[in-house]
Image: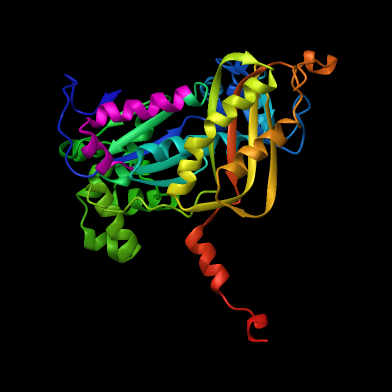
Amino acid sequence: MSNYNNPKNKIKVWTGKAIFHVDINSFYSSCEEIRDPSLKGKPHAVIMTDEENNNITKGVVATCSYEAKRLGVQSAMPLYKALNLCPNLLLRAVDKRYYNMISEKVMEILERYADTLEQASIDEAYLDCTRKISSMNVTVDWYSNEIKKKIQEECQGLLTSVGVATTKSAAKIASDYQKPDGLTIVHFDELKNFLNPLKVERISGIGSKTQKILEEEFKIKTIGELARANVQVLIERFGKKTGTWMWQVANGEDDEKVTPRGDHVSLSNESTLDNFSQDRQEIQEVLYDLIDELYGRISSYSYEYRTVGIKLVRTDFSIETRETSYNSYKNDRESIASAIDKLLDRFNLTKNQDNNESELAKKIPPIRKVGVRVSNLIRIPNKMKINSQRTLLDYI
């Protein structure tokens, strides 16, 4: 952990908003390591391609492991160039459905810690944790480590880099400061000293074109130099909105809020089994135990749902999912429980209800983790609004 400009690592009182930026390290590649732990410590890459695993001959690198990055492999690099740099590069085809599933789990964890959560992309989010940290009477240091630890525990070792500051822009810069598995905390009175020596390209939103203009026309290379620039000159060159924004970010004075982006796509709850199992009744009981917390969250958000799904993760880390949809929206606990019973019948398990073992199921790895998920969500007030809208039939 880096507690910026605090070499003795003394715990300081936090001043101002507590804004977190959480970035999942090399997300696609990290997801593939969850599915196949043998990839850990090796150079490997996820490829944008229409070809299948074990037969990838063309495409573009979507992301790669840090071992591959150290050899020069980069995102958006053609596969042939990546293989020239790293002939033993292990390849996996992009699997967005699987990555989205992991991302949803991470975002659900982050929601527990945030006053407000803004998902910026599949692998990063902003959190305003000001009220929760204050009400719990804990330090930012402790809270940051709890977030990292919880994601690592509940997402099979997934590592994140976290930045904490009093503004969104600085939190984003801080999360990029140390990778992988970094934690950089920048207190309000340290913000300018932290930003000053960094290149302007570190500011999210300043692209290569703007960077070139700043350097060639204004001789500005660092954030500190941008902070000391005449804001009126920046406004004249880049316009009022952009010029003011750049100057405020460089001075740590921007006040953009963490803003939720729409409703949930789904809600889920998961649990790792104490002992790996193929026993249908044991698995069913664990799934039933997950319902109460999930239903509590459904109720707290005033959601109704149409689709219920369950997920089983086997000891070889393969993931199997089944789901079913109701004809109408539901908001009761029992509709989740009754769907689980039927969905379990669609999996191959060693022991069925009669306690018999099939020859096929004997060859299938046992279950190590289970999950319950609801999707096709709608908030009850929104539903009432939809139902209250009249149609032509209402006037006949």
Q: Is residue 4 left or right of residue 242?
A: left
- Image quadrant where residue 395 sits: bottom right
Residue sitting at 54 percent across and 73 percent down? 388
Q: Residue at x 53, y 19 (%)?
A: 67
Q: Is residue 136 magenta?
A: yes
The C terminus - image quarter: bottom right
Q: Is residue 46 left or right of residue 228?
A: right
Say how the picture is coloured: rainbow
Please, is residue 8 above or below residue 78 in the view? above
| Residue in front for this viewpoint, 73 or 259 | 259
At x 30% / y 23%, what residue is drawn?
Answer: 1
Q: Is residue 78 visible?
A: no
Instruction: Mark yes or no: residue 263 visible.
Output: yes
Q: Position of residue 156 (x, y in %)?
A: 52, 22
Q: Position of residue 343 (x, y in %)?
A: 71, 35
Kindly give the residue lying farthest to the right in the view shown: 359
The answer to whether residue 271 is magenta is no
Residue 219 in percent (x, y) is at 29, 48
Between residue 87 and residue 358, name the one nearer to us. Answer: 358
Front-most of residues 186 and 337? 337
Q: Quadrant of residue 338?
A: top right
* Quarter location, residue 93: top right
Left or right: 249 in relation to 182:
left
Vertical arrangement, residue 203 with respect to residue 282, above or below: below
Q: Name the main secondary structure of what is drawn in magenta.
A: helix
Q: Is residue 362 above or below residue 330?
A: above
Q: Residue 45: percent from the left, percent from the top?
A: 62, 27
Give the magenta part as a residue range.
128-153
